[in-house]
Image (cartoon, grey):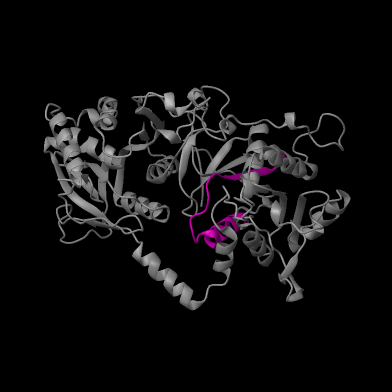
Amino acid sequence: MFVPCGSSAPPVFEGFTLLLPAVSVGNVGQLAVDLVIFTLDMPKVGYFYTDCLVPMVGNNPYATAEENSTELSINAEVYSLPSKKLVVLQIRSPFVKNKYRSFCQTVLSWVKSSRCAKVILLSSSHAYQRDDQQLHGTPLRYLLSPAIQKTAGDLMQRLNWKEMEKVAAYPGVNDAEMVLHIPGGGITTLLFSESCSNEIQMAVLLKFCSEGDNIPDALALVNYLNEWLQLIKSEQNSDAPATPSQWKIPHSWRLLFGSGLPAALF
Amino acid sequence: MATFFGEVVAAPSRAGGDDDEEAAAEREETPEDREIRRELEEKREVHILWSSKLSASTGSFTDEQFPCSKFILAIGHNAVAFLSSFVLNSGCWEAIGSVKLWNEWCRTSNTTSVLPTDAFCLFYKLISDPTVLLCQCNCYVAEDQQFQWLEKVFGCMREEDLQVTILSTCPVTDYKTPESTLTLPSPFLKALKTKEFKESVCCPLLEQPNIVQGLPAAVMSYCQVWQIPAVLYQCYTDVIKLDTVTIEAFKPVLSSKNLKSLVKDMSKSTEILKKLVTTNEIHNNIYT
């Protein structure tokens, strides 16, 4: 459930775009959301208190100075920027077993009660599961729920984006039945299909990637998102993607691969 | 992915377990699967058993709440031994309840006279001020049980200017620092506090990008969301078992506002501590 922080009037999200990540391969969605929150300096407006995620706390991951570095952060928090009609839910830990469906239901009922205009889910999928066709060209894909097709379908055509391909449900046996299959995508498929059934305007933006240093994947995904939402203006002309240096890297990304090595090792 | 020897293995993902299989399993559950899952959930349920001394009624506690101004929670055997030696030794405490839970790692025992090696989770109240509650949690509370534990324990409290103090330990290898953890002078103490906690802390705050997980994180999250002043003292140590050096690393916490008034007689503490640690060692020695 959404719990606003602070004692002022609860924030209003009517007509806003909700951006959230799927906990997926390489944590690319979550890294991309970190870039959005930190670059746009979005203030925290509340918590998403749920038993579906593994608990975790730490000090403010977006700290810029001594003063704001001691604010405690939990595993699911909500940030908002009314000037861009953007609300972001950041998820920082994996799901508790058997809680996928429960989480999807909670999020979608929150979307409905807060009357968000649309939802954009940032996700990723295992690069090694691509078929021969997918190995060529862009590794970025999109999906649109039927409810958002009318408003965003044309834009996708103009941007020349590639829709996520369906695969045969029983490959080799029966190639007629095609299903959506996003390996490594976490709750992506479930949340997307639930949105379709509930007539929610949802778009999924995902990137094929592998585990490793996923910072470049996050930058690619956030630039992909920026082509649509125009959250930051790119320096050169409006057609080129924003340069990596325009997205600010939060300090919590330090030591992503562990502590320093002992000198005695060498 | 292929390893050096050419065999193909499933690559582990930082994003979680076999999420696709799990999501698919959730979609295609049969009535039998549902029944098995329900039975397993029942087995993993967390139960709080309050003694009859807590209220006038006999047997276990039902829907009543008791007032609580201070909640001190020790998680893990070193933190538990610290409170046993320095706070509970004063004889001013009364055992009032226990947690009954089961998971793949432990089953809690019901008795109040426990060894440091037992799995237990016991509650004590201060006789002179029954709004002060202390919890010794020496059992592993699994991920899916943490929320339940939290809701059931805090659900029994009627908060009256509630302040929460948590003591916990963690391996020093989990601590992220630009230098190597090998050269760090461990054990050392780090703190995290919620927004409403205005008192001073007894050690440096935990720097980014370090995080805390498990039951301490669950309690801190609850307190942060519901605006309860709370502080967590996490001791980073390189010793896994019960260890006097690690336990004594918590000593600065005794000067904190919440614990200062509860420490009566420190002269016996070292003796009690030594006894606790040696009992554990003898227990583990197969040659005696």
Q: Quadrant of residue A100?
A: bottom right
* Residue located farthest toward the front when viewing the structure as drawn: B5
| Range covered by the magenta-colored residues | A84-111
Vertical placement of residue A251 versus A15, above or below = above
Q: Nearer the viewer, residue B111 or B47?
A: B111
B147 vs A111, left or right, is left
**Viewer-nearest residue: A8 or B195:** B195
Quadrant of the rendered image containing residue B196: top left
- Say whether residue A242 is left or right of residue B242: right
Residue A87 painted magenta: yes
Residue A117 at least partly seen: no
Residue at position x 52%, y 46% in the image:
A93
Give the left or right position of residue B287, taking residue A249 as reference.
left
Q: Quadrant of the C terminus of chain B?
A: top left
Of A101 and B190, nearer the camera is B190
Between A109 and B25, the one lying in front of the other is B25
For residue B104, say whether it is visible.
yes
Residue B143 lies, with reference to residue A256, above or below; the image says below
**Residue visible at 75% across and 44% down?**
A225
Up-down relation of residue A215 to residue B28 (above or below): above
Q: Position of residue A80 (x, y in %)?
A: 62, 40
**Residue B153 in magenta stretch:** no
Residue at figure coordinates x 71%, y 32% from the top left: A247
How far from the left and from the top, in percent, is residue B202? 33, 24
Question: Residue A27: horizontal and vertical position, in percent?
Answer: 61, 45
